[in-house]
Image: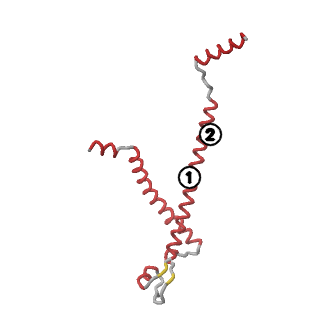
Amino acid sequence: MFKEFREFALKGNLIDMAVAFVMGAAFTKLSSSFIEDLIMPLVGRISGGVDFSNKFVALSTGVTATSLVEAKKQAAVLAYGNFVTISINFVIVAFVMFLVVKAINKAKALTEKQAEAAADAAPVEVSAQEKLLTEIRDLLRQRQ
């Protein structure tokens, strides 16, 4: 049973999945930092310093607070600002992923073109058997 478990645990696919999981977690932190620390301050600056995360609509007249946290304590609120922030984050991440995939595809295409050019440039080596068969063919044509 231990042998079977070891074989399972050391399979290539399982290792690949573990590496992908760790890389995904690291990429999540990186993309979150990129958006929260670099992009959102720029969006706030462009929008005149508006903090979207604190935007809400009160669903009852009893809400007098100006911050979302306090308003949620008072009554039900429609917190649309968080949705706007998450939507902006999604668009930014999707666009960056598009650029990354586009760059990878371009690099692959370039590599494939270089490999094809190298294959075309390499002289084709004819085997000794093929040379002999070609000579026989040519001799048979001369006889006719």
Which residue corresponds to mark 1? 101
Residue extending farthest top: 143
Q: Amino acid at mark 1?
A: Val
Disc 1 is placed on an element classified as: helix
Disc 2 is placed on an element classified as: helix
Give the residue displayed 71% in from the left and 10% down from the top: 143
In the drawing, does residue 64 fall left or right of residue 92? left
Residue extending farthest left: 1
Residue extending farthest front: 144
Local packing at callout 1 (Cα closer than 10 Å; few below 14, some 14-19, many 20+) is: few
Where residue 113 is drawn, which disc sits there?
A: 2
Give the residue displayed 42% in from the left and 47% down from the top: 16
Residue toward you, 51 or 86: 86
In the drawing, does residue 115 fall left or right of residue 37? right
Give the vertical position of 15 relative to 78 (above or below): above
Residue toward you, 119 or 46: 119
Q: Amino acid at mark 2?
A: Lys
Labels 1 and 2: the sequence-earlier one: 1
Query: Percent x, y for residue 20?
Result: 43, 51
Query: Percent x, y for residue 98?
Result: 57, 56
Quarter of the image where one finds residue 140:
top right
Question: Quarter holding the C terminus?
Answer: top right
